[in-house]
Amino acid sequence: MTHALKTAALAGATALLPFAATAGDAWFPYPAQAIEPPFSADGEMMEVEYVPLESASQDWHICVSFPHMKDAYWLGVNYGVIDEARRLGVRMTVVEADGYTELPRQISQIEDCVSGGADAVVIGAISFDGLNSLIREVAGQGVPVIDVINGVSSTDITAKSLVSFYTMGYQTGAYLAETHPAGTDEVAVGWFPGPAGAGWVEAAHNGFLDAVEGSAVRVLEPRYGDTGREVQQRLVEDVLTASPEVRYIAGTAVTAEAAQGIVRERGLTGQVDILSFYMTPGVYTGIERGFILGAPADSMVIQGRIAVDQAVRALEGEEFIAHVGPEIFVVNQDNINEIDRNTILPPDDFSPVFTIN
């Protein structure tokens, strides 16, 4: 483990996360969790404080590939990678494939980045397995590959900057299971885990189902779909029409954002409650206004920052944590006024940035 990281006290680490403030505008040190051994499904989780490099030794060119920029979640990751690239003093090119159905396009964009001279690649993967051949090829050329946010099954990657979406899904399901334990009246939940085949989706799905098992929560057939607003809106409307007994809508942040208006329009406020298994600005606002019950926060901005730092460390031969992500904590209507929004979300006025020269 790198000297730039210090072991944090286990007690109270989660409670302290939203308030991880430091002098000036620095985002670090940031409470995080490292997995040892790296890339292991059953590795040991260790509490750490992440501290990045002060600056890069040269203006490396880093290519960042996203599945899309359709929602505010990936806008937050975009802010994280761009702002960290500026802080470290490196060049950056950001590409986006326009959706989870566009795996061939993501592969082609990454190939173009590498052939164009990218020194390192950061990938928010469309598919858990579908990029493995490409990653092997890129890594074979000596180009560091960082797996950010979504997760891939490849063992040829250099590092992972991500959290456990199993935990994110589990925490969301655990709220329902605790609210509706076995022996109480059954409640129906419409469940919208996201695009089928994505690693983060399957992880969240498994965590959610494990958490509600044995409770009075009945999960309807999962409705998979791209995280575009129109797709999620249509899925929610279909479920509410087909299953009027639905008590909760739970799923992606885009699902939660879209469901707010649908619930109000159908006069279901107070009858159908909404949960998201991750955080976006829209979900944050929904919680503030009382339209969304809560959501785990995975600090997507920090995940993007860490990925860029990992890439630079790999290029410069510096030690780095190979598998790490920010600490997860739950934001709800009880604690939202105590949390520093800037630690988990991008500025309200941030627009997508695709190039830093």
Image (cartoon, grey):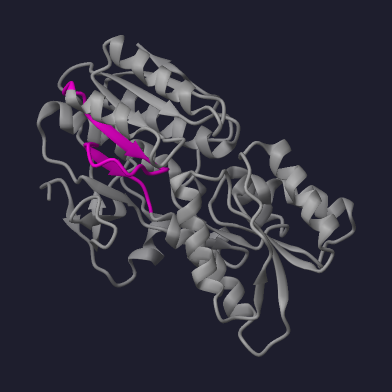
Q: Nearer the viewer, residue 223 or 290?
A: 223
Residue 252 pos. (x, y %): 60, 50
Quarter of the figure with the C terminus: top left
Residue at the image position 58 percent from the left and 77 percent from the top: 177
| Number of dots carrying numbers | 0
Residue 340 in sight = no
Reply above or below: 16 against 157.
below
Name the one closer to the observer, 154 or 258: 154
Q: Horizontal placement of 82 versus 352: left or right?
A: left
Image coordinates for residue 325, horizontal then vertical, percent: 33, 50
Residue range highlighted in magenta: 141-163
> Between 224 and 69, which is closer to the camera in this rendering?
224
Q: Going by the image, does 269 lie left or right of 189?
A: right
| Image point (24%, 37%), residue name | 157
On the image, which quarter does residue 189 sit in? bottom right
Viewer can see residue 56: yes
Given residues 85 and 139, the one toward you in this image is 139
Is residue 150 on the magenta stretch? Answer: yes
Drawn side of residue 233 relative to residue 346, left or right: right
State yes or no: residue 350 in magenta.
Answer: no
